[in-house]
Amino acid sequence: MSTVTRTGTPRAVVTGLGITAPNGLDTEAYWDAVRVGKSGIGRITRFDPSQYPARLAGEVPGFTASEHLPSRLMAQTDHMTRLALVATDWALADAGVVPADLPAYSMGVVTASSSGGFEFGQGELQKLWAEGSQYVSAYQSFAWFYAVNSGQISIRNGMKGPSGVVVSDQAGGLDALAQARRQIRKGTSLVVSGSVDASICPWGWVAQLAGGRLATGDDPDSAYVPFDAAAAGHVPGEGGAILIMEDEAAARERGATVYGHIAGYGSTFDPAPGSGRPPGLRKAIELALTDAGLDAADIDVVFADAAAVPELDRAEAEALNAVFGPRGVPVTAPKTMTGRLYSGAAPLDVATAFLAMREGLVPATVNVEPDPAHQLDLITGQPRVLPVRNALVLARGHGGFNSAAVASAL
Amino acid sequence: MNARREVITGPRRVVITGVGVTAPDGIGAKSFWSLLSEGRTATRGITFFDPSAFRSRVAAEIDFDPEAHGLSPQEIRRMDRAAQLAVVTTREAVADSGLDLTALDPYRTGVTIGSAVGATMGLDEEYRVVSDGGRLSHVDHTYAVPHLYNYLVPSSFAAEVAWAVGAEGAATVVSTGCTSGIDAVGQAVELIREGSADVMVAGATDAPISPITLACFDAIKATTPRNDDAEHASRPFDGTRNGFVLGEGSAVFVLEELESARRRGAHIYAEIAGYASRCNAFHMTGLRADGAEMAEAITVALAEARLNAESIDYVNAHGSGTKQNDRHETAALKKSLGDHAYRTPVSSIKSMVGHSLGAIGSIEIAASVLAMEHHVVPPTANLHTPDPECDLDYVPLTAREHRTDTVLTVGSGFGGFQSAMVLARPDRSES
Amino acid sequence: MDNNQTFTLESLKRILREGAGADESVDFDGDILDADFEELGYESLAILETCGRIEREYGITLDDSVVSDVRTPRRMVEVVNEHLGQTAPA
């Protein structure tokens, strides 16, 4: 079975990508880096991390927000909102969309967030407790909250259609694309979706450290090694991708260039600890395949969640082996070059999947010596020349969120 | 109303079969309804911390003892107050539904929980510790509690609710500012309609009464400075209104597909017949006076419900009590409902339970379905002084017996979000 | 607080820039004294932020009505100086 189009259900195609990643500030810079295995992980520069057990991160290089955004927006935005607004501008330009030319109610915005504008929040908490409540900024009323990117994107681009914000840690990046697709199926022509996340500030860092999953050590080449016997946590990153999703007919009508479409999606939540029931990732994959009308054999490559926590790596490998058979499908984790971007990770993986389709080349998982016990066909070392029609992207969030999406060529 | 009767066919329809509410002076749906139907107010001077440094020092607080409501010491320790409220409220909703979730396919039960500001109380308290009272910009991780990550990511609220009911389907937090409580339920409806779930545990929670929240609303003068009359401080649609009163709470619903609810003989509170959300694309906090985008959301929600404006028996308003909101909302109702806006009762329960940000949309859905249960419209408390710009029937001071079969509830939030939901009897005739 | 402290257009421009940024399409070196804040790109939230900063820096408390009623830099400078006159310690 190959591509089955459900009659009467409009397809949600992707026509524009806007990427801000630790190893590349725009789509071409990112693809140039990721296809040759160039990592963006290094010692944190946004603050002095000396006192913390984890000191590495994937920071977006060379981003000077004031070169891209008006001064009036600078005072009221967190770093991650600035990245998201610029990524949106680029994605719209890539799609050839001028929002002012389209009916305002025909365009929506659905983004994900994991922790909002945490750096902005730290600044205001510090003013509150160190100086007093009257020092807190008027912009604190929204600059840190989870809905801020959808709101600011909608305002900047005059988009009044159905919009939303989902928060499900790293899985949220796919949940946002699914909600965007839902709105397109219900009749909205265009939805700005995806996510850009960042909380690389001392307060965000301490909160992430409390999660117990950060890699310690100072060597960027050995810190984040999912599916390796030496896996010992992840390196966080910042950034992500904004995708322009459109109703296929509307996109064709305006002669848009199409990367592909979001063909399938499935989502589950792990059972409560101690329940004895199996984790839900396998079921999420099966749901996504069914939704896409595809068999496991139709999937050309899997972009793994790649937690780099031994039991989570094992759970992911088991889910993949159950669906595809041992070494049954090529698997990759380009996020080894960016760190885990929380809600920004999966939209970036989806974007990477479309870029891989375009070139017929799948980026590698860097720095990893795969543990044979996982029985995965992990693409390591060199990128693999591989025609890609259907890519499965996985994302899991802290606490048990499992989401899976299928990105397909038309 | 058109008398033509027609069996509504088509996509799966979604009904509410369980209701849970934890609101100020209204723990449990019964107690919540007593407060509303008696027109009492739960606003008071803040007791959670010393508010003397703040401009606005009133709030609608819940006297909530998590242990008395069945949470274990470990659950209490790891959960922010907002998560505690959500879990307790969820248990009430599931018990009320009579549904044995453990007997269903867990992958077919999902969770959507709305929250505007996440674990604000937990974050505020923990920040104070790790920063040593704001002295350290490089905050000290050795003082952090192990569950700080759960405060960082409010998705932990959806996780706690899913664990509490054994749901293993899609789970997420929906965070669209002050429309979160409507949008979380609206997103859940979409999941059942499209066939991704059979049962959704959907609702919202927020517990924002903390110094950082007070400070940010002080900074934009959004909250009322009427500190000398806390009991009457929340005055939606009143000519003397000067800001909202911060509140906290949670409401959670069990949503089911109509036919399966009927088959098991469930008590059906209401069908969620229509839902729409739009953005004003104008300003993060400001509202255009004409209410056009809220009106659009209302019009689309009515169309989805296949009902006309005249069918609406009651409008449960956003009615926050700020100058601009109540004017904006009044304009939106006139624009979308026409002359019927003057004939239908409109009220704001925020006059009684305050504004609990992301939670209030769900709490107002609860008020709406309880109004349908009792055929009683809750009042707008503290409404004594007419405002020429707010000239609808706001049901001042006392609840009103009123045939209530179809309710419109609306919300408006920072970020520009405008949402509307239509609740109706599943066996209604279409208009 | 400095007894002779005065609040000038330059002070206002500095605080506006710090707190709310400056619209690139507006010439702030031109004659803006009587321009409406909206024309200068500052909506009510920017004025709230600006008033908050003025209050902290100058140790005064402005009335709530300032945000809605004061429409121009000239009037803002006047209002702040009126407060400074009233509140300056003896």
Image: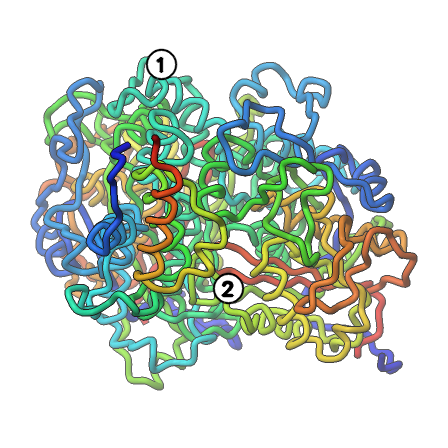
Q: Chain of mark 2?
A: B
> In the displayed structure, does residue A66 sit left or right of residue B375?
left
Q: Which mark is residue B287?
A: 2
Q: Quadrant of residue A397?
A: top left
Q: Quadrant of residue A98?
A: bottom left
Residue drawn where x is 28% and y is 79% of the image: A256
- Residue B369, given in percent of the width and then of the height, sits at 79, 53
Q: Are marks 1 and 2 in contact (CB under 8 Å)?
A: no
> In the displayed structure, does residue A274 sit left or right of residue A339?
right
Q: Which mark is residue B143?
A: 1
Q: Amino acid at mark 2?
A: Leu
Front residue (pair B266, A195): A195
Where disc 2 sits, the SS reads loop
Q: Please determine whether, in this image, residue A373 is positioned above or below residue A83.
A: above
Q: Residues within 10 Å of mark 2 (few under 14, many from 20)?
A: many
Residue drawn where x is 50% and y is 33% of the image: B54
